[in-house]
Image (spheres, helix red, strand yellow):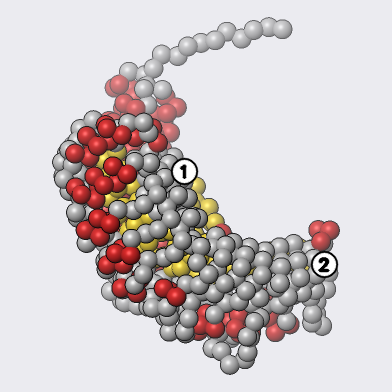
Amino acid sequence: MGTIQTYVLSPLPPKESWSLFLKHACAEMVEGESSNLMEFGHQVVEKCGGIPIQVRMSGNLMYSAKETEDWTSFEKLPSHLKPCFTFCSIFPKNSEIRSDDLVQLWIMHDLIKPISNQGDKEMEDIGEEYIKELLERSFFQDSEKREHGAYFSFRMHDLVHDLATSLAQQENIMLTFAAKNISRKIRHVSFSDEDWSGHEQQVLNFLGKLTDVQTILFPVDGVGLNSESIVNTCIERFKSMQVLDLSDSRFEALPESITSLKDLRFLSLKRNDRIMKLPDSISRLKNLHALMLGGCSELSNLPKDMELMINLRHLEITTKEEALPALNSFKSLRYLGVVGCANLKSLFGGRETFTALGTLFIHRCPSLVSLPCGIRHLSALKILRIDDCGTLDLLDGDDDNVPGLKSLRLLVIVKLPRLRTLPKWILQAAASAFNTLSCIVIESCPNFRGLPWEVLQKLDSYPKFKIENCPKSIVPGPDAYVGDKKMKSITDVLVRVKYSIFFHY
C-alpha cells in the first residue's frame, strides 16, 4: 500500500488573515468605520491562529446574506435586545440554554419591556419573542423544541459568545471566576465547576473584591455549591442582590439572614437533596418573583405565610407534605411546577387561587388521587402537563357546568394508568369553536380508550395531535378508518398503538 506525503501548512500572517476575514465578513468595510467592531474583528482573527478555514468560517459568521452592512448586526439590534444579548455571556460557552430559564433571568433584571400597544401581554411571552428575534438574527443557533413545545433550547456560537463577553466586560456587568481583570463594580458573576471546586478560600477572596453584585449564578446542571461560608458571604456582602442561584447545592440549611436581601427576586435551591427545612422568614421576601424548590426531596414542608409573597410569578416545588394549603393565595403566579411530591394527595383550593396562571406542570406525584375543582376555572392557563401520577383520576368530580380552559394551547398527558378518556373540562377546550389548543399529546396511558368524535372531527385545526403507546385506544365516528390519508392542514397527527399500527386521519 502506498503512502501519502503529509504537508504541514504554515499559518497565514496576521495581515493576510485580516484580509481573508474582511473578504468573507464584509468586503466593503474599511478601517475606522466602527471602532468597536473593528476591534472585535481583530480579536476574532487573532483567535483563529492564522488557520485559513477558521478565518473564512469566522468571516462567514459575521456576514448576513441580505446586505453587507449587516456585519454591524449588534449595533443594529433594537435597543431593548442589546442588554438581553449581552446578558447571555453569563452562560458557559457551548452550553444548552433553556428559553424559560433565560426569560426568567431577563425578567428578574427588568430587561423585558412591555409592548405599548399590547399592554396585556405577559412578560414571559414577550421574552420568548425576544429569543425568537435573536434566533432570526443568528445570535442564537441550534434551536430545538422541548417537552412538545413547552419551551425550547438553543446555543450560542463560540464567536458570538466572545462578542457578548467582550461587550459585558467593557460595560463592567459580567464576570467569571477565571477572569484576570476584576472591577469592584461588576454586577453579575457566573461560576462553573472548574472555577471553584476545591478552592473555597480563593472564591472567598474573589468575592471580597466585589461590592455591587446583583447575580450569583451556577448555570451548569449538576454543578452547585457545597460551602455554607460562601453562601453566608454572599448574603452578608451583597445586600442589593437580585438573583441567587444555589441549584445543586449540598448544604442542609438556608441561613435566616437570607431575609436581609430585600431586593432578591430569584432564589433557586433546585436539586438540593439535603435541605430539610426553609426558614419561615423567607416569606417576608416580598419582592421575590421566582422560587425554585424542585428536586428538594428532603424538604419537609413549605415555609409558613407564603401568601405574603405577593409578587411571586414562578414557583417550582418538591415537598414531603400531603397537602399544599400554602398555595391558596397566589394571584400573581404565572408558572407552577409540582415535581416529585411522593406524599402529595391534594393541590390547591378555590377557583380564585391562580387567576393569572399560564403553565401548570405536575410530575411524579404517585399519591395524588384527583385534581382540585379550581383547575377547571384557570382561564389564563396555556400549558398543562401531567406526567407519571399513578393514582390520579382526571374524571373525579367531572361535570358539565364548567367554563373549560379557554386559553389552553398545549396539553400533554403521560403515564396516567387510570386515564380512560379526557374529562369534560378539557374536552370543552378541545371542541370549542374558539379554541386556542394547538397541540394534544397523550402517551403511555394503557387504559386510554380514545377521544369522542366531536373532538376528532376538529383535528383539522390542530397542528399537532399524538396518541402513543395507548394500546386500548379506539377511534369512533363514521369516517374513521385505517390508512395513510391525512386531513389537509394537519402537519403531525399520529395515533400509535400496540404492534406499531398507525391510524391517520
Whether residue 46 is visible, yes or no, is yes
Residue under the image location 50 percent in, 67 percent down: 321
Expressed as whole percent of the image width and height from the top left, the position of residue 303 reads 37, 66
Name which residue type carries label 2. Answer: Gly
Expressed as whole percent of the image width and height from the top left, the position of residue 51 reads 41, 22
Q: In this view of the protein, which residue sits in the foreground, 325 or 103?
A: 325
Name which residue type carries label 1. Answer: Gly
The reply to whether discs 1 and 2 touch (Cβ–Cβ < 8 Å) is: no
- Please tell me whether residue 193 is drawn above or below residue 2 in the rendered image: below
Which residue does the numbered mark 1 point to in the structure image?
Answer: 222
Q: In this view of the protein, which residue sits in the foreground, 360 or 366?
A: 366
Quarter of the image that includes the N terminus: top right
CA neighbours of label 2 inside 10 A, class few (<14), some (14 to 19), many (20+): few
Residue under the image location 44 percent in, 68 percent down: 335
Expressed as whole percent of the image width and height from the top left, the position of residue 290 reads 36, 62
- SS at mark 1 in the image: loop
Which residue does the numbered mark 2 point to in the structure image?
Answer: 483
Residue under the image location 34 percent in, 72 percent down: 305
- SS at mark 2 in the image: loop
Identify the disc placed on residue 238: none
Expressed as whole percent of the image width and height from the top left, the position of residue 79 reads 25, 57
**Residue lying farthest to the bottom in this orientation:** 401
Marks 1/2: CA–CA distance: 46 Å
Q: Quadrant of residue 451?
A: bottom right
Quarter of the image that includes the C terminus: bottom right
Whether residue 76 is visible, yes or no, is no
Q: Quadrant of residue 281?
A: bottom left
**Nearer the N terminus, badge 1 or badge 2?**
1
Does residue 49 appear to the left or right of 374 in the view shown? left
- Please tell me whether residue 458 is drawn above or below residue 283 in the rendered image: below
Does residue 178 appear to the left or right of 426 in the view shown? left
- Please tell me whether residue 393 is drawn above or below residue 59 in the rendered image: below
